[in-house]
Image: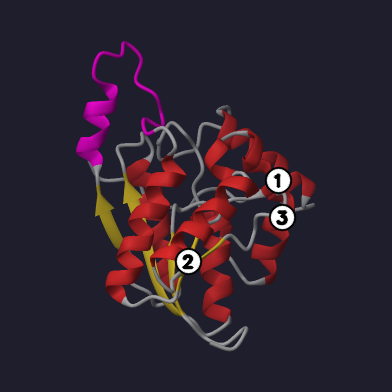
Amino acid sequence: MPPNSPQHSLILASGGVESATLLAMAAHDGDTLLPVFLNYGQRPAAMEQAAARAQCRRLSAELEVLEMADVAAVFHAGQERLFHIPLPHRNLVALSLALSLAEKRGAHRVVIGTTRDDAGASPTATPAFLDQFRTMAQELGEVTVEAPLHGLDKATVVETGAAYGVDFATTYSCLLGGASPCGRCPQCRKRAEAFAGAGRVEPACTLPPAED
């Protein structure tokens, strides 16, 4: 396929700033969008899914949800503390499922929203891991694995998203999962720093409370 030509793109949609930016970029390029949300029992899953759905609705795309919430119970077993993100190496799991689904749906590529800032937080967000996963994907078929934002910090992603018309009021990043982001968790702080670094006012969340 020629470079920059429209593609059938499976985009891992988490509801955050990064995946919202990826969706807007792909839509701008004329790609056929296959947004996929992975519910693996993370604490903010309901609000993240609501955000991803709102972003997809704006682009006339249908969100597909992979329900793995029961998996969290297995990973929580025997733990006194319930972690906000129960699944270790989540990018490995997410990309593996996305690659399989892309093959099934006839998508040309899988797109994930990791950034430069993520590389220090998870070994499955490093350039080395992504390169190795791409190599594996090439051995399995013709679906490519891409991380277009990986060389950018979060502030630059905000600037990029704004240029593509992302409605940041419908993005969600809080680890606690409340209708109103807490503003104190690591994700909320990183988000606030990114908007400040981009010279933009962080908008209030306009998503309705998630249904139980």
Which mark is nearer the camera, 3 or 2? Answer: 2
Is residue 127 magenta-colored?
A: no
Going by the image, does 26 lie left or right of 9? right
State the image coordinates of residue 75 (x, y, percent, origin top left): 28, 26
Give the Cα distance between marks 3 and 1: 15 Å
Amino acid type, residue under disc 2 in the picture:
Gln
Image quarter for residue 92?
Answer: top left
| Start-end of magenta stretch | 69-87
Q: Quick one: quadrant of the C terminus?
A: top left
Q: Identify which residue is drawn at 42% across, 75% down.
A: 33
Foreground pick, 194 / 140: 140
Q: Identify which residue is drawn at 62% across, 71% down.
A: 165
Helix, strand or loop status at disc 3 = loop
Image quarter for residue 83?
Answer: top left
State the image coordinates of residue 185 (x, y, percent, origin top left): 55, 28
Where does label 3 land, which residue?
Answer: 151
Amino acid type, residue under disc 3 in the picture:
Gly
Which mark is nearer the camera, 3 or 1? Answer: 3
Amino acid type, residue under disc 1 in the picture:
Ala
Where does label 2 land, which residue?
Answer: 138
